[in-house]
Image: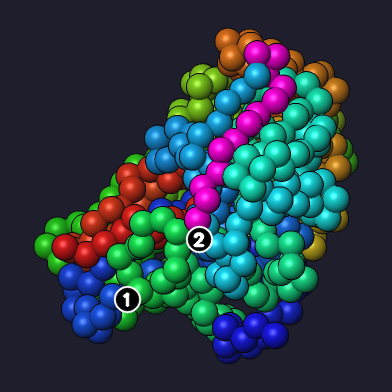
Amino acid sequence: MRTKIRHGVVAAAAASILLVAACSAGAGSGGGSSNAAKQALTVGLFAEPANLDFTATAGAAIPQALLYNVYETLVQVDENGKIVPGLATSWQVSDDRKTYTFKLVDNAKFTNGESFTAEDAKFSIERVKSAWTVSLKSAMDVVDKVEATSPTELKVTLKRPSNDWLYRMTTRIGAMFDPKWVGNLANDPVGTGPYDVSKWTRGDSLTLTRNESYWGKQPHFETVTLKYFKDATAMNNALLSGSIDVIGTVQTPESLKQFENNSKYKVVEGTTTGEVVLSFNNASGPMAIKAVRQAVRYAIDHKALLETCWGGRGQLIGSMVPPTDPWYEDLTGQYPYNPAKARQLLQQSGQANQTLRLRLPTLPYAVSCGTVVKSQLEQAGFKVKLDQLEFPAAWLSTVFTNADYDMSIIAHVEPRDMGAVFGDPKYYTRYGKPAFRALLAKADQGTPEQQVEYMKQAARMLSEDAAADWLFLLPNLVVADSDITGLPKNAVSESFDVTHLGRS
């Protein structure tokens, strides 16, 4: 039995951390951390994983910690969104765009000592379809056949051409597993990556230890501890006192002032794929009526909201597409702030006397922005009841699983997630209209140029139909000790990739 993980509290796989604010990597110790004497790094993050199995548990926290660090993929995405080699050194696509042939590295091993081969890749891809339970698994439905044609060559044949499939292989569904070690993924992950999970103290931290037999370039730090905080002020104070080296997820932008003019620290600001969504229940209650949803969108002054609840940092987007995607369009003008129009639509809907339930997770950005949303809606004639639900358990059960809400606020941080969030009528947004799904299918199967045009049409449809309101795009805000190197400006993948970080 493998005994490498020494849990402070053994994981009990319950509800998942869902879609939390995007983060970027960080490291270092210019502020005097005790980590300076050894090659160790401590990163402060806000929401910890409920368990370590992203094949059965939805949400961003698990791949944030494990993807690229512990689990590797055949292909990866860099901070500019470009697909680059991972465990595959190269790949070719057939003329009919249905067959991908990957050349694999020949010297990779799992951290349990087993060699990685094309048979493991075949197993991992097929297992997404047969054993995964999270909704993201549907991206692998397009796969028809997987063949290990040699220990270092893998051939994947799709049912039809897909513009999206290779990109999805850079995400968690492309993670490579050892077939002999998938029985206890929630507690004991085994990958081919440059780090191994060595200690998990539930409610406190997750420690990654460098894999000394890693097949590729060794990372700088021997250990990386992901330290989880429930209070933003406590995390800021931890950096100031030197007990952590990096704030990986800045929760209160106004707190940056204490670091920006201090030579001990550096602040990195870029973009993410994290859309802060005012989610609507499209299937039941007042929000099932289009006029009510439209009224809500007209009632929100997005510029004022961004200034008030997020210090003006971030970007207004008006859709479920960040500017780093090829099909981005600025749709912020589609529903300009117009409280008079909002009142008119609300009266016409016949729902003016209904109370909207705004049910928020106890995450700083959601609570901060939620109070602004409530105030602005009430100024436009809405009746709003605001509830705070403990995150993750209560929010996941009430909103995500049971859709017992009218509106909520959550940051969806997975890349290219428009289809995942709105394409399934059983997902918590309860949208999934056939016409929308048809556009997604056309985008996936068409030429690259058609993909861009159909995805634009899908985004416009969501916006016009007021399937949600997009408050803003989260910025990538990282604060680190000044001697840290390798901090990426943009966070456009699921991974909190610590493998490129160093100390000058």
105 part of magenta stretch: yes
Q: Residue at x 31, y 59 (%)?
A: 501
102 part of magenta stretch: yes
Left-right relation of 293 to 27: right
Left-right relation of 419 to 482: right
Q: Which residues are magenta?
A: 95-107
Q: Which residue is mark 2?
A: 193
Residue 164 seen in this snapshot: yes
Amino acid of disc 1: Ala
Q: Height in image: 326 above or below 155?
A: above
Residue 50, image x, y percentages: 66, 70
Mark 2 element type: loop
Residue 281, image x, y percentages: 79, 42
Q: Residue at x 33, y 69 (%)?
A: 221
Q: Which residue is mark 1?
A: 40
Mark 2 or mark 1: which is in front? 2
**Observer-nearest residue: 270 or 167?**
167
Q: Residue at x 41, y 71 (%)?
A: 212
Residue 34, image x, y percentages: 25, 84
